[in-house]
Image (cartoon, helix red, strand yellow):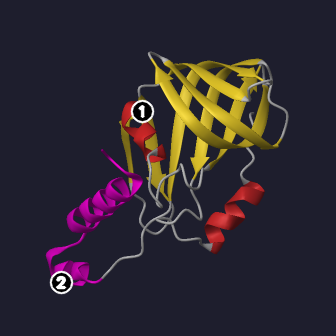
């Protein structure tokens, strides 16, 4: 089973080994700071059941994109089905400390953003459901062109940085 710890450790090791020139290879033996990873999931549409707090992403991409903040600048993708096990048991899992997400929904030319905590993912065919705890904003019953920006800042394997914490205050998209 792929855990977040295994994924982050593997990605960091791969990036540090392939990115360093041979002269700096001996520095790779020193423990490196774990990068802050963010994940992005996209879907054709969404629905939200307010009674059960269930958000369903319809036509979700089979690929979840991930990237890190500076200075590492690691980027890649993974199967969305491989992302779900991050909610497995253990102290470093999303089960013990669920991530926050910015759920961005296009409504015509308007962008609606909802900040929520993601819990209990279920992938069934092309639909991905989360139980959500809304922290900010108003989730519509239906929407199209959805992007979910999953921020794991402050998780056990992603050290809190000032840049990461400050990112929340200005991370508001503008459509032009």
Q: Which residues, given as a range, are shown in magenta?
A: 1-30
Q: Is residue 133 above or below residue 146?
A: below
The x, y position of residue 48, in whole percent, is 73, 22
Mark drawn on residue 141: none
Picture coordinates of residue 155, whole percent (x, y)? 55, 62
Which disc number belongs to residue 26? 2
For the point 79% across and 19% down, which residue is it?
Answer: 141
Which residue is painted at 35% across and 77% down in the image?
32
Report if the CB atoms under discs 1 and 2 are less than 8 Å apart.
no
Say if 3 sits above or below 176 in the image.
below
Residue 111 screen position, x and y as percent: 77, 31
Of labels 1 and 2, earlier in sequence is 2
Percent x, y for residue 107? 77, 21
Task: Please name whichever residue, 69 or 96, is drawn nearer the observer in this view of the structure.
Answer: 96
Q: Secondary structure at mark 1?
A: helix
Q: Quadrant of the C terminus?
A: top right
Judging by the rendered image, the residue that carries numbered circle 1 is 80
Left/right of residue 165 with respect to residue 41 in the rendered view:
right
* Residue 26 lies within the magenta run: yes
Magenta stretch encompasses residue 169: no
Residue furthest to the left in view is 22
Q: Is residue 65 above or below residue 97?
A: above
């Amino acid at each position: 089973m792929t855990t977040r710890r295994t994924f982050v450790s593997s990605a960091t090791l791969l990036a540090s080994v392939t990115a360093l020139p041979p002269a700096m290879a001996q520095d790779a033996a020193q423990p490196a700071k774990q990068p802050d990873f963010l994940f992005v999931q996209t879907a054709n549409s969404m629905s939200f059941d307010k009674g059960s707090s269930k958000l369903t992403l319809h036509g979700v991409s089979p690929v979840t994109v991930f990237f890190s903040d500076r200075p590492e600048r690691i980027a890649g993708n993974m199967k969305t089905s491989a992302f779900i096990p991050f909610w497995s048991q253990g102290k470093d899992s999303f089960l013990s400390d669920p991530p926050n997400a910015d759920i961005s929904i296009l409504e015509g030319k308007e962008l609606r953003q909802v900040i929520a905590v993601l819990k209990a993912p279920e992938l069934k065919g092309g639909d991905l459901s989360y139980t959500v705890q809304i922290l900010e904003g108003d989730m519509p019953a239906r929407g199209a062109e959805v992007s979910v920006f999953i921020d794991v800042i402050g998780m056990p394997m992603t050290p809190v940085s000032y840049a990461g914490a400050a990112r929340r205050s200005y991370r508001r998209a503008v459509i032009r």
